[in-house]
Amino acid sequence: MFYKAQIIVTVWLLLITTVSHVEDQTRFNTPVSYTIEAPEKVRLGERFVITVAFSIEPSWYLYAPIAINTDQGRIPTKVTFKIPNGLKIIGELELPDQNRFYDTYSGDDVRMSQEFQVEKNISSGKQTIKANIIYQTCNDEICYPPVRKTIDIIITVE
């Protein structure tokens, strides 16, 4: 009986180690990359745009941020910004068109853009905007765990 318990514990530990290893690999080898496009310098009163541009490998996709995806338990792609005093978000996040029959994004040019206004009461110098990015990468067989990143975007107000 003791020998049987040892085998069960050994197999269980082996499975846990394997699952952990696979999860660690997926976090570093996801088929999605992104860049952030933002101006380095802005002036008082000026409007500017920050864009998060995703590139998704063929046969993979991201879920669009629409109600049906959330209702069905999918993790929709989300980009939000935390801004310092003296900056103002203008309008809604501009989203790309989703795939026609599916509520997903795919391809090498998926862009989400937000417009900002530099208000007159902001201090000149370096300002930090925090971009919060959440997405889940899937194909027809598997979904990787969601990715949650916070990126500091430094702009200089002149």
Image: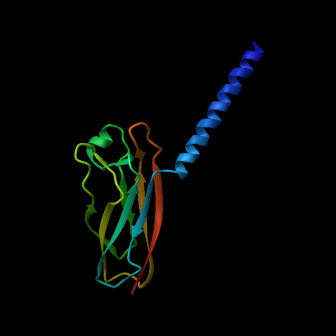
Q: Residue at x 71, y 27 (%)?
A: 10
The image quarter containing residue 86 is bottom left
**Residue 21, position as x, y percentages in the image:** 61, 42
> From the viewer's perspective, is residue 103 above or below residue 119?
above
In the image as oriented, which residue stretches furthest toward the bottom?
158
Q: Residue at x 72, y 18 (%)?
A: 5
Q: Is residue 140 left or right of residue 17?
A: left
In the image as oriented, which residue stretches furthest toward the front?
58
Q: Is residue 16 left or right of residue 44?
A: right
> From the viewer's perspective, is residue 45 above or below residue 17?
below
> From the viewer's perspective, is residue 112 above or below residue 126?
above
**Residue 106, position as x, y percentages in the image:** 33, 51
Q: What quarter of the picture does the C terminus occupy?
A: bottom left
In the image as oriented, which residue stretches furthest toward the top?
1
**Residue 138, position as x, y percentages in the image:** 41, 43
Q: How many marks?
A: 0
> From the viewer's perspective, is residue 18 above or below residue 62?
above
In the image as oriented, which residue stretches furthest toward the left?
100
Q: Residue at x 47, y 68 (%)?
A: 152
Q: Residue at x 73, y 16 (%)?
A: 4
| Nearer to me, 73 or 17 | 17
| Nearer to me, 87 or 17 | 17
The image quarter containing residue 120 is bottom left
Q: What quarter of the picture does the N terminus occupy?
A: top right
Q: How is the image coloured?
A: rainbow
